[in-house]
Amino acid sequence: MTSIGRGSGGPPWSVDLLADLQAGALDPQQAEQLWPQVNADPEAREILAALEATQADLREFANVPAPPMPANFAARLDAAIAAESQARATQTQTAPPPPQPAPVVSLDAARKRRNQRLGIGIGIFAAAAAAVGITFAALPSGTGDGGAPPVAQGPLNFPSESIGPEQLQAAKGGTDYGPFSDKAKLAGCFQANGISPNAEPVGVKQVTVDGKQGTLFVLASTPPGTFRLLTVGQDCGPGVPSLIVEKKGVR
């Protein structure tokens, strides 16, 4: 292959330009003008083929199953949990009996005892995890007024203003198209959002944004190494962008 220059409208082609064209990151009108020229250039087609092969390799990584926990670590974790549970039981048996409760128990006192019992259960598991060198995130506490605990936020369940690198890493390489497995529906949705219908996402995941069900698409963007995150509703299609949240230039 000959060297590729930095041209933006014809040979010698810029690799960055061809990558954006192949990923559907260019303006639809510009892409429509460039495709006939690129398809007529053998060198440009060779570069596009290499890009498509690279994307195919990346998608395969997403389907590789995670290896199971090594047996020796699993055994150590089980032993640590059992030992910590036994220690807690021994402490409970040797502790002095609690004072007799008053005839009338306040609501605050009842809640405090409930929280203490929850803390013991969490402590057993956390201590066991520390024994084998595993770190866990802190469990969410209750609301403090007897209600249900808040729903935990995660990379695929997030408020619209927090979309960024965490969602990029969670969705990159994913292939869960959900309602957009229909290529015609997908192409219509992309067009409605100003994206080339031939765009090939580098990752797709089903997400929940501000309590709404949606589909997150990861698209290659410029400059190289950045991505465009597009989240749309399930009714997205021709003439209906159904945009939930979008962010460009995410690394």
Image: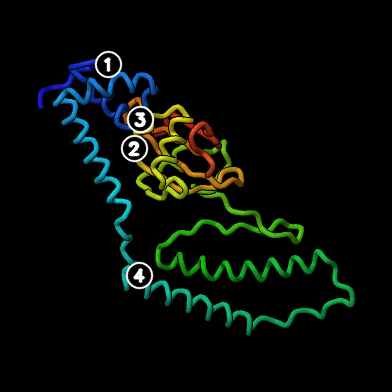
Instruction: Check disc 3: other Cα within 10 Å, few if <14, some if 14-19, many if 20+.
Output: many
- As measured in the structure, the alpha-carbon distance from the residue carrying label 3 to the one carrying label 1 is 15 Å
Instruction: Check disc 1: other Cα within 10 Å, few if <14, some if 14-19, many if 20+.
Output: some
Q: Which mark is residue 24?
A: 3
Q: Nearer the viewer, mark 4 or mark 3?
A: 3
**Does 153 sit left or right of 145 as displayed?**
left
Q: Is residue 96 above or below residue 37?
A: below
Q: Name the residue tied to disc 4.
A: 73
Residue at the image point whose x is 37% and y is 28% from the top: 25
**Does 235 sit left or right of 62 as displayed?**
right
Mark 3 or 1 closer to N-term? 1
Residue at the image point whose x is 53% and y is 77% from the top: 85
Position of residue 246 measured from the top left corner of the image (x, y, whole percent)? 50, 33
Q: Name the residue tied to disc 2.
A: 200
Scheme of colours in the image? rainbow
Q: Name the residue tied to disc 1.
A: 8
Q: Secondary structure at mark 1?
A: loop
